[in-house]
Image (tube, rainbow, N blue to C red):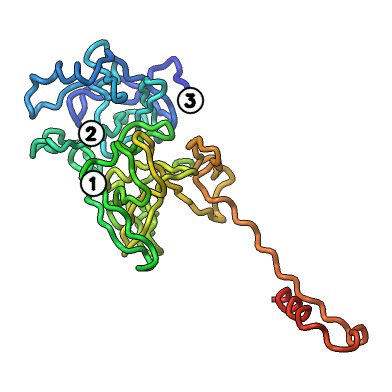
Amino acid sequence: MKSSGAQPYFRVRRSKIHGTGIFATRPIKKGTRIAEYVGERISHAEADRRYEHKDHDDNHTFLFTVDRRTVIDGGVDGNDSRFINHSCDPNCETVIEGRRVYVETIRDVAKGAEIVYDYMIEREADDPPNRAEIFGCRCGAASCRGTMLLPHAKPAHAGESKKGAGKKAPREPSKEKLFRVRRSKVHGTGVFATRAIAKGTRVIEYVGERISHAEADRRHGDKELDDNHTFLFTVDSRTVIDAGTGGNAARFINHSCDANCETTIEQKRVFIDAARAIKAGEELGYDYMIERDPSDPPNIDVIFACRCGAKNCRGTMLLPPKKPRRKPVRAKRTPAKATRKGPAPAKAAARKQRRAR
């Protein structure tokens, strides 16, 4: 992690997105830790008490949820990080380490650019009908979803396997929410089970805009070689799902070399199913199984580094290099003079024939 220098990375001024914002005073490299989100640490109950008098259409607070027990109120003893606005196309993310919250860049940030991250506010069953408008987003990004709220999770559907038979249909989840989105120790944001999930349960569908491979290359062709941050999922040789546009919480499921989930493609739809029993509080993960390409740079394993921490972690999201296939050794023909008299035993002849194939 890059450390900050003496010169400040940002300054506070008026923002076109909303009210006050934070703007880079100089170019900032990807992976730079630019600020800590600080303030008074309170309980969820205290946070509710402080802001229960606010009107339903007033979303203005400086609260940051750390975990199930702790909320940081940046409105009390907070610093400039509380002015960082939301964006659906963020250049930063928040990272929780030791229950402290840091803001880090996820790509290079140009001088003068506004520093932003995705608030990823979860929806609740008792939300008022206009909650998406209350938390309206004005970031202006091409991928703007119009709200700071996470997209609605589409109801999962049971279905047949890709081949249509010979496999049990996935379990239907109960109406109780299976997961929630929060900060992850593996990387940035993750998805965590809110209750025990049985093996075979269909957790969520991976959704987003369906585009061609050429369009996917066009959208992300200008990214730096060492930037692997996209929400692309390859369906087949013609279709890619870009969950950065119209996606749901499935796009935040991190890679794991010891995955508890797997992806299943049925009629060009992608589903995430539980590959084993999952405990409440456990982070969901599946193996990205990213294929290698002959044009990969030498540091491709570092670019797609894995931090899952599993005992069998291979250190990268890429599949292991394919071992070169050994060329079959052709059986040498024995000169006629060297052949022994009489026919060879049938079993020996068969062995020679199999070797030569």
Comes first in the chain, label 2 or label 3: 3
Residue 121's disc is 2
Residue type, mark 2 in image: Ile
Gap between marks 2 and 1 measured at Cα:
23 Å
Residue ID for mark 3: 2
> Quick check: marks 2 and 1 in contact, CB under 8 Å?
no
Question: Can residue 222 be seen here?
Answer: no
Is 348 situated above or below 79? below
Across and down, in percent, residue 346 comes to: 76, 83
Other residues around mark 1 within 10 Å, as few (<14) / some (14–19) / many (≥20): few
Residue type, mark 3 in image: Lys
* Furthest residue toward bottom: 342
Question: Quadrant of residue 281 in the image?
Answer: top left
Is 288 situated above or below 195? below
Foreground label between 2 and 3: 2
Residue 284's disc is none
Question: Can residue 54 be seen here?
Answer: yes
Question: Quadrant of residue 335 in the image?
Answer: bottom right
Across and down, in percent, residue 345 comes to: 80, 83
Residue type, mark 1 in image: Ser
Q: Secondary structure at mark 1?
A: loop
Foreground label between 2 and 1: 1
Query: Which residue is located at x 93 percent, y 86 percent?
Result: 337
Residue ID for mark 1: 174
